Image: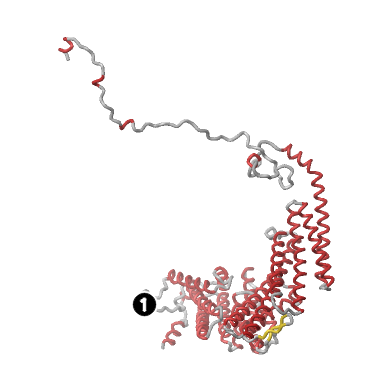
Amino acid sequence: MGKQSEASAMEIDNSKPNVADQISPKFSINVLQLLKSAQMQHGLRHGDYTRYRRYCTARLRRLCKSLKFTHGRGKYTRRAITESTVTEVRFLHLVLYTAERAWSHAMEKRQLPDGPNARQRIYLIGRMRKAVKWATLFSQLCAIKGDSRTSLEAEAYASYMKGNLLFEQDQNWDTALLNFKSARAVYEELGKYGDLENQVLCRERVEELEPSIRYCLHKVGESNLQASELLHIGEMEGPALDLFKAKLEAVMAEARSQQAASMTEFHWLGHRFPISNAKTRVAILKAQELEKELHDPAADSLPAEKRLAIFDKIFTAYHEARSCIRSDLASAGNAENVKDDLNGLDKAVSAVLGQRTIERNQLLVSFAKSKLSRRRDDKNEKVTKPEELVRLYDLLLQNTADLSDLVSSGRDRKPEELAFSEECALKSLSFRAERCFYLAKSYSLAGKRAEAYALYSRARSLAEDALQKFQTLNESDQIIKELKMLCDECRSNSCIEHAKGIIEEVKAPENLSKRISNMSLTVAEKKLEKFLLEKLDSYESAVGDSNVKAVSRIEVFPPAFQAIPRNPIVLDLAFNYIDFPSLENRMKKDKKGFISRLWR
């Protein structure tokens, strides 16, 4: 009975409209633009569904209060929204945001760290059903109360929600495909009309629906998509793709777990370490798949941001594997053989992690070098300074030293480990040459010619030493080519610094006399912070220094007013409160005659 009353309450009154209803204006809502704006401003730009759900709840509370559509004070009394209830457009907003709240709540459960368990999944599907129910009601109301465009958008929104529900339930793929195609057809048609912003939003929604349609075709069996193609589809961004990404990740995790069953050993520098934990296998297998994607020839065309994102995923997978290994070590007890295998596996995974860290930092170096040599066309573009490259090479030297220490920490070292240590030493030498080169560049930009010349000469010496060793070992031509270019640049820059230093030394007396002649007691410019007389205790060259562009100032003239001491002002405030003794008896009295006594 409760479900029947609820269904009857949600039904739309299909009675014949009267004359007043016929002349009432149709409501217009740009559904996609309204939802996109709300989602981007309230959390979904960063995938924060909790924040968006709270916004929808607060928005519904404000709408109910402003429309006076509350459900009682003390006792909850449900009020249904029917055709006769919708007297203004805010009632349609009420239904729309109720559907959005249910959908965002379901997506919030979907994004739990370990994924939803059985109970949470039941709750998630319940919230998706609630979103479908309110989206269907919104579509029905807009078909009656809205204009033609609003009705079409509401129908596409309801089809999208129905497709999401079936997509999450892993059933009725034909129906889900039909709903997604229906929504795509509506948005493709709407993208041909309206203003430019609306056309862009419709095209973006069509692109977001495309991966879900292709996945449904794959499940139905009408598509020959491979797993790698599905991964490339999952690289797209957008709130509409979050459910697809979660489903794709679940499918890939299942495939990895099946593939990891055959993975029993981890090979590293001639060693074979057994892997007994299934979670460790899956994490290592995930990292290896990402490494294949990163080292693929097509990955060179990817932008640096996406390649860095792949590196972050690799680090996450290897850290997860290390945490599983550490847990196994803690529970190994006194089994020495098991502990030795786990320690060796931990060392191997840590070494691979160190190698990927070096590769990531080398990618950052190449990106910074491209920005250093490229001219700044955009004013807002950040320019790379040589000091930033010096810092990156410091990180590379530290990473190489840590990796070399890790590899050489064992007792019985194999030839592969010795060769790897030599390779780390050669890399460290080339990194030192590069660091010295960019350190010389920073001194050159600061106008310190002698230091820059010495550093360029040192960088050239290190580069030639590294080049000789790499040629002896017949390393890759790319590294040898880079070292040759570095030697040539060091030689040319050292010659330039030498020439500039001689020119500055020749012109130093002329510049000194010119600056001394320009010195004055005071100058109208206020670029310098202190006068010369205020800097007598510190050795700072104010004359003849190439870095000083302003004219030197000796002292302020005329001098400023200074406070001088003066005599204090004494105010006698106690005088009015002192009672002095009477002095009449000590005063001189006048002598008077007999007559004056009579007249007294």
Query: For this rendering, which residue is in front, 163 or 32?
Result: 163
Numbered label tally: 1
Query: For this rendering, which residue is in front, 83 or 56?
Result: 56
Residue 211 image position (x, y, % from top left): 65, 80
> Which residue bears the numbered disc 1?
75
The secondary element bearing badge 1 is classed as: loop
Residue 376: image quadrant is bottom right
Residue 316: image quadrant is bottom right
Disc 1 crowd rating (10 Å Cα; few below 14, some 14-19, many 20+) is few
Q: Which corner quadrant holds the N terminus?
A: bottom left
Say above or below: 378 vs 399. above
Q: Which kind of residue does numbered mark 1 sit on?
A: Lys
Q: Residue at x 73, y 75 (%)?
A: 299
Question: Is 335 displayed left or right of 511 in the figure?
Answer: left
Question: Is 587 displayed left or right of 247 in the figure?
Answer: left
Q: Can residue 181 be spotted in the picture?
A: no
Query: For this rendering, which residue is in front, 85 or 225?
Result: 225
Q: Residue at x 83, y 51 (%)?
A: 499
Say above or below: 397 vs 188. above
Residue 360 image position (x, y, % from top left): 70, 71
Q: Residue furthest left?
A: 598
Q: Can residue 576 be spotted in the picture?
A: yes
Residue 519 image position (x, y, % from top left): 70, 38
Q: Which corner quadrant holds the C terminus?
A: top left
Residue 262: image quadrant is bottom right
Residue 237 image position (x, y, % from top left): 63, 74
